[in-house]
Image (spheres, rainbow, N blue to C red):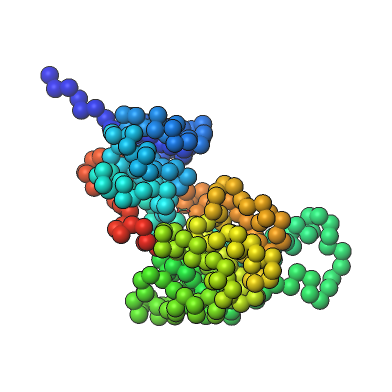
């Protein structure tokens, strides 16, 4: 009598939609963390013993130290388009597949980038606090006067899918002139369809009225926006970060916002998430959101299903659907 092949074992590192767990449980032995405890490295290692697959999120750090202690692991399906939490070099050296969730979150994330741009430029966070705190007492000619959005110059750093989504919203919806800087220049047809103009980094910093960061975080982009870069920006400029906190030197940004080097910022990502630098909390001219740019229910469900699809395809066919591209660490989102 043939003994049945054991089903692959997988760990779902954080709570996820029950219907996604049900799909996975039809094919795999599933250990899920519906209690949604944030597992530290030691807990993750303990839960990964004997597991061949992992459905991870952007907060789960998968590095060489962890991999060395989890010899059964064959695939990590990250429920995020970014993959800075995965040591891709260490994973590929061990033959472990890494996947991410590109495409399904592009428009939702671009929508949110634009929301932050609007909020920072038109001071909506500051204005809302003012109303709630009973400080709205009279009309004044310059009360809550912010920066113009329509017809202004929109700068995009990192022109991947999300950058292009933000660019299209600005150009088509708000009549903005779009300039961008990216590792890879778009082809002429894509540039013309937005339309967007490729410029050097210095020109991007100097000419943008609103600069949106969508570039992947890597050694090459770490603290790309530092004190010197901020000093090149217009004093009326706004900066929006929907990429990763490490792209911006947070201390330099705090000084720039304090001293009027730039006018305002909208931040969805931070250097030490979920901790936010206390100085940011007390600055009026920064809008702070908790890494939620992809957080519509429909998009989060699509992301979870795509991560699950990757696990299923990998174990059933040997090929994942959306592996992390090579060279991994500098691909734009
Ligand atoms: C969110 O930040 C993601 O990378 O999907």
Q: Residue furthest right?
A: 137
- The x and y percentages for residue 259 are 69, 69
Query: What is the tally of numbered marks visible in this picture?
Result: 0
> Is 124 located above or below residue 32 in the figure?
below
Residue 174 in view: no
Residue at x 47%, y 52% (from the top left corner): 299
- The x and y percentages for residue 122 are 68, 69
Residue at x 31%, y 47% (from the top left corner): 90
> Is 323 located above or below residue 225 in the figure?
above
Q: Is residue 193 left or right of residue 313?
A: right
Q: Is residue 298 left or right of residue 287?
A: left
Which quadrant of the structure image shows residue 197? bottom left
Residue at x 23%, y 40% (from the top left corner): 316
Residue at x 22%, y 44% (from the top left corner): 318
> Is 132 located above or below residue 314 in the figure?
below
Which quadrant of the structure image shows residue 113? bottom right
Please identify the quadrant where the C terminus is shown. Answer: bottom left
Please identify the quadrant where the N terminus is shown. Answer: top left
Q: Nearer the viewer, residue 325 or 29?
A: 325
Q: Nearer the viewer, residue 95 or 187?
A: 95
> Is 323 located above or below residue 235 in the figure?
above
Q: Nearer the viewer, residue 25 or 147?
A: 147
- The x and y percentages for residue 201 are 47, 75
């Amino acid at each position: 009598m043939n003994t049945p092949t054991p089903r692959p074992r997988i760990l779902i590192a954080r709570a996820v939609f029950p219907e996604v767990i049900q799909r996975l449980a039809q094919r795999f032995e599933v250990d899920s963390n519906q209690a949604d405890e944030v597992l530290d490295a030691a807990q993750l290692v303990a839960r990964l013993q004997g597991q061949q697959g992992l459905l991870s999120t952007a907060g789960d750090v998968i590095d060489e130290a962890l991999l060395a202690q989890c010899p059964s692991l064959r695939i990590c399906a990250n429920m995020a388009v970014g993959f800075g939490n995965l040591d891709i070099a260490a994973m590929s050296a061990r033959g472990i597949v890494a996947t991410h969730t590109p495409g399904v979150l592009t428009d939702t994330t671009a929508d949110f980038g634009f929301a932050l741009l609007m909020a920072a430029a038109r001071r909506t966070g500051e204005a809302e606090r003012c109303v709630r705190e009973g400080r709205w007492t009279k009309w004044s000619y310059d009360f809550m006067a912010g920066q113009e959005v329509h017809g202004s110059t929109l700068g995009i750093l990192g022109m991947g899918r999300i950058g292009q989504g933000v660019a299209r919203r600005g150009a088509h919806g708000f009549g903005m002139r779009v300039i961008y800087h990216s590792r890879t220049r778009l082809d002429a047809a894509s540039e013309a369809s937005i339309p967007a103009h490729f410029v050097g980094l210095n020109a991007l910093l100097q000419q943008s009225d609103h600069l949106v960061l969508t570039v992947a975080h890597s050694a090459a982009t770490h603290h790309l926006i530092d004190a010197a870069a901020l000093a090149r920006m217009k004093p009326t400029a706004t900066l929006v970060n929907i990429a990763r906190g490490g792209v911006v030197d947070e201390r330099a940004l705090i000084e720039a916002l304090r001293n009027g080097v730039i006018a305002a910022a909208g931040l969805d990502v931070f250097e030490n998430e979920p901790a936010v630098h206390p100085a940011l909390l007390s600055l009026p001219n920064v809008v702070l959101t908790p890494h939620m740019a992809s957080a519509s229910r429909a998009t989060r469900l699509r992301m979870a299903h795509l991560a699950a699809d990757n696990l299923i395809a990998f174990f059933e066919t040997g090929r994942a659907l959306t592996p992390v591209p090579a060279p991994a660490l500098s691909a734009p989102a």
